[in-house]
């Protein structure tokens, strides 16, 4: 039985993945910042050990990786405090550097990483995508001697997601007019369980080593399409006001100062590039992507704001 350390295992993607890993018979060690907050959903799973620790501490990582065969890192942030990139670098780059050292010390040779579509350390416009790209560079370097697989999804949807649920919450607070920034940006939302299936199938597949998989859902939508669909699903009457590039940026700069940053300058910069796949790598494992229309109506009206505050 493989022993797998999962970072970000209590978050939206992580909880679904760890549930599946447990069912597949893997021994799972989840490193989390707050064990009690997350114990309800995960502590009863067989073969799962939920450990509270500071994952940013190299000594802690060295300790908890002892005797393990593999690491899966799902930790990531969409926004940071401030707008200079330091928060993104700390979470997406510095943590990866520490994980590489800890894996080397403990002889771990298999690593999986949840990145993002359009991650690119050199050409991306946002700190989010730049730092995700830098993490990929570090992990896929021949110097570290690990068998690495990176997953690069478009926006991920499913119960407790931070995309459709976020817009649902904003729509609930909107009387009738809904000003929408970056309304032309295209997305191909991927269902969280399709992503999980991809990870499971790639774990023991040697052809996935040193691969970066671009992952998308079956359909392409503009952001305006997706917000309109969310409103329709909620039976919410609203008029979407598309904002041009100037007013989109102004909205982002204003929202930078709102707690929780529902939309930030860095989000705006990420949205300057369409989040769609030229080739969808789900097909490599014969996974048929699930459309939003099959899933979103089942959860969109049962939104829980607490879902924003998790490890991933």
Image (tube, grey):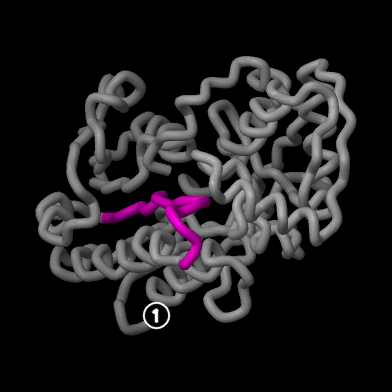
Of residue 126 and residue 202, the one placed in the foreground of this image is 126
Residue 282 visible somewhere in the drawing: no
Q: Is residue 151 above or below residue 139?
A: above
Give the left or right position of residue 100, taking residue 85 as reference: left
Please, which residue is most extreme toward the bottom here? 143
Q: Around disc 1, counting alpha carbons within 10 Å, would you say few (fewer than 14), some (14 to 19), or many (20 or more)?
A: few
Residue that numbered label 1 is attached to: 141
Is residue 289 located in the magenta-colored stretch of the structure?
A: no
Q: Secondary structure at mark 1?
A: loop
Residue 2 visible somewhere in the drawing: yes
Number of numbered tags placed on the structure image: 1
Q: Residue at x 32, y 34 (%)?
A: 25
Which region shows up in magenta? 70-84
Give the left or right position of residue 90, taking residue 169 as reference: left
Q: Is residue 36 above or below residue 83?
A: above
Measured from the top left, where is residue 273 in percent x and y?
73, 64
Chief SS of the magenta region = loop
- Figure quadrant of the C terminus: top left
Residue 65, quarter of picture: bottom left
Residue 241, quarter of picture: top right
Measured from the top left, where is residue 150 in percent x and y?
49, 62
Q: Residue at x 28, y 55 (%)?
A: 70
- Figure quadrant of the N terminus: top left
Q: Residue at x 68, y 30 (%)?
A: 170
Q: Is residue 181 above or below residue 291?
A: below
Give the left or right position of residue 78, taking residue 179 as reference: left
Measured from the top left, where is residue 56 in percent x and y?
23, 56
Q: Residue at x 48, y 39 (%)?
A: 13
């Amino acid at each position: 039985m493989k022993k797998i350390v999962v970072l970000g295992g209590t978050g939206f993607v992580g909880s679904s993945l760890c549930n599946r890993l447990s069912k597949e018979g893997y021994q799972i060690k989840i490193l989390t910042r707050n064990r009690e907050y997350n114990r309800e959903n995960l502590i009863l799973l067989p073969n799962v050990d939920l450990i509270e620790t500071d994952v940013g501490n190299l000594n802690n990582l060295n300790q908890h990786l002892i005797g393990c065969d593999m690491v899966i890192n799902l930790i990531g942030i969409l926004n940071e405090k401030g707008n200079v990139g330091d928060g993104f670098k700390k979470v997406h780059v510095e943590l990866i550097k520490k994980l590489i050292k800890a894996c080397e010390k403990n002889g771990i040779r298999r690593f999986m990483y949840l990145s993002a579509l359009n991650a690119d350390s050199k050409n991306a416009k946002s700190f989010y995508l730049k730092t995700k790209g830098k993490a990929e560079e570090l992990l896929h370097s021949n110097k570290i001697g690990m068998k690495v697989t990176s997953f690069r999804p478009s926006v991920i949807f499913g119960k407790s997601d931070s995309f459709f649920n976020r817009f649902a919450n904003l729509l609930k607070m909107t009387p009738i007019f809904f000003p929408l920034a970056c309304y032309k940006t295209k997305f191909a939302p991927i269902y969280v369980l399709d992503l999980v299936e991809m990870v499971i199938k790639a774990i023991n597949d040697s052809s996935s080593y040193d691969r970066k998989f671009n992952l998308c859902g079956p359909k392409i939508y503009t952001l305006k399409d997706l917000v309109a669909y969310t409103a329709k699903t909620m039976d919410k009457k609203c008029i979407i006001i598309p904002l041009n590039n100037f007013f989109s940026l102004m909205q982002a700069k204003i929202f930078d100062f709102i707690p929780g940053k529902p939309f930030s300058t860095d989000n705006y910069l990420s949205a300057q590039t369409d989040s769609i796949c030229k080739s969808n790598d789900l097909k490599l494992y014969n996974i048929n992507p699930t459309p939003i229309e099959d899933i979103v109506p089942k959860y969109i009206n049962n939104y829980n704001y607490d879902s924003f505050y998790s490890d991933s």
